[in-house]
Image (cartoon, rainbow, N blue to C red):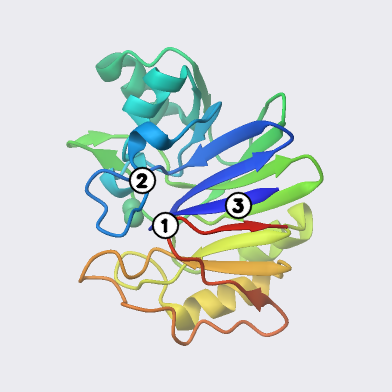
Amino acid sequence: MDITFLGHAGFLLSESGNTIAIDPFLSGNPTAVHKPDEINCDYIALTHGHADHLGDTVALAHRNNATVIAAFELANYLADEHGVQNLEPANPGGAVHTDFGWVAFTHAFHSSSYDGRYTGMPCGLVIRMGDDTFYHCGDTGLFGDMQLYGELYKPDVAAVPIGDRFTMDARLGTRAAELIRPRIAIPIHYGTFSALASSAEGFAPAGVEVRELKPGHTIAI
Ligand code: NI
Ligand code: MN
């Protein structure tokens, strides 16, 4: 699996010719290096409806004819207000099976709305492509069932929000990564806006390799 960090909480995952974008927030993201027109993807998976996650989803979905995988109410919002046709709605505990593998929905302790409209549960996403498993925690506080998700899904990589205020900080994110026990942890959701922590300093889970990715950077796992 090739993992490209789009900045903030966004990623592109590619494996065997399949590409999925997660939370593609590019327009208005001061750290992003990609333009929305440069993103080619078959699927878009969303953790929740906040603008810094929904991002350029509508434009990407239309231009790529991509399928959007999102919480039920968020999928309904995209259909009702933006005419997105290829939708796979889900909710925590369930999974969407695709031609590349599957996307499972986990809990996340947060909120989810767009333009005043409720957009369903905030979620984490566990994405299986080929033999690789990527757990995007979404925007969330710390919770003990992260350990259970680690045991169930055995993620190779976990993307953990550590920017404080709206999510965990580096100290709590460290505990989260130690509960999940991935091979690699990528800190996310920091350094984008002044309200967030400016660096990943202090994110140091024991027994887990930390990879700090700059926007536009790709790693192969
Ligand atoms: Ni949020
Ligand atoms: Mn956010």
> Which amino acid, by three-letter code, is at mark 1?
Asp
Q: Which residue is mark 1?
A: 139
Residue at the spot of label 2: 53
Position of residue 109 measured from the top left corner of the image (x, y, whole percent): 44, 57
Residue 3 marker = 3
Percent x, y for residue 111?
33, 50
**Residue in view at x 34 percent, y 45 percent:** 25
Label 1, ligand 1: CB separation under 8 Å? yes
Amino acid type at image mark 2: His
The image position of residue 56, as x and y in percent, is 32, 35
For this rendering, which residue is in front, 199 or 75? 199
Q: Position of residue 104 (x, y in %)?
A: 64, 40
Within 10 Å of disc 3 (Cα), the crowding (few <14, some 14-19, many 20+) is many
Labels 1 and 3 touching (C-beta < 8 A): no
The numbered disc on residue 40 is none
Of the residues under marks 1 and 2, which one precedes in the sequence? Answer: 2
Q: Is residue 174 visible?
A: yes
Please state if 32 lies on the left or on the right of 159 as rendered. Answer: left
**Disc 2 residue crowd, few under 14, some 14–19, many 20+, Cα 10 Å:** many
Q: Are marks 1 and 2 in contact (CB under 8 Å)?
A: yes
Q: In whole angstroms, how far apart are the C-alphas of marks 1 and 2? A: 9 Å
Ligand 2 within 8 A of label 2's CB? yes
Which kind of residue does numbered mark 3 sit on? Ile
- Distance between the Cα atoms at labels 3 and 2? 17 Å
Above or below, comparing residue 130 to residue 68 in the picture: below
Could you tell me which quadrant the C terminus lies in? Answer: bottom right
